Amino acid sequence: GNSVTQMEGPVTLSEEAFLTINCTYTATGYPSLFWYVQYPGEGLQLLLKATKADDKGSNKGFEATYRKETTSFHLEKGSVQVSDSAVYFCALSEGFGNEKLTFGTGTRLTIIP
Amino acid sequence: DTEVTQTPKHLVMGMTNKKSLKCEQHMGHRAMYWYKQKAKKPPELMFVYSYEKLSINESVPSRFSPECPNSSLLNLHLHALQPEDSALYLCASSQDPLPLAGGFYEQYFGPGTRLTVT
């Protein structure tokens, strides 16, 4: 079956530091890949997505590139802010339809001023 | 309006109680979802409704009973729950359950109902 493996947290960084959160996946076929963010007390928000190999998703300064050869979708940001503190989930969906999202375990990110 | 609302925000219930969780969206979405999220864990899909019909049940125990009375509303009826059912219950919706090939319709999540079973 499908699975997503994410970098264990928690991760604590200083403001303006460079962020990488690793994500690798196992899937049959050609899944779509996503990063969701969950701020304290809130539901999940889609941060970015990529639907095919070599696609780069980007939003709010975050980027991730769909690497089929390494089955990875690492999240990066060049300069993090305190407001980026949240839990980040890597996820995938099957190639046909989007009903079922398979999530990684989540990485809690804390940015200190 | 890209909001999914859920009520109540918090719910405490005994194992013999019957209660319901409610979810509402006014985005014209035709797919709605229930997820369960335990502390420090990712969300797990429970049910999917497509065009108001149940399309996916992820082998959820019958003490959880979903209902979709119309395209904007989704309920989750709870009966005889166990303490291990305590979790954050998230509702989500998307424009269409089966987008065109290669497409994806974002799932919009509500803030959740935090359920405690005593």
Image (cartoon, rainbow, N blue to C red):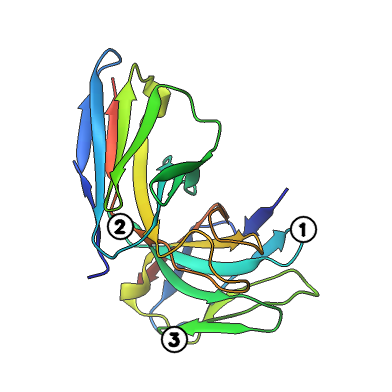
Chain letter for mark 1, please.
Answer: A
Instruction: State the separation of the CA atoms marked 3 and 2.
Output: 20 Å
Identify the residue at horizontal 38%, vertical 47% (top origin): B52
B107 or A49, which lies in front?
B107
Looking at the image, which residue is at 26% across and 37% down? B21
In this image, A40 relative to A105: left or right? left
Residue B46 visible in image: no
Q: Residues within 10 Å of mark 3 (few under 14, many from 20)?
A: few
Residue bearing the label numbered 1: A28
The numbered mark at residue A61 is 3
**Residue situated in front as seen by the camera: B91 or A67:** B91
Q: Which mark is residue A40?
A: 2
**N-terminal label among 2 and 1:** 1
**Category of crowding for the residue at label 1, using alpha-carbon neighbours closer than 10 angstroms: few (below 14), some (14–19), many (at least 20):** few
- Amino acid type for the residue under numbered disc 2: Pro
Q: Chain of mark 3?
A: A
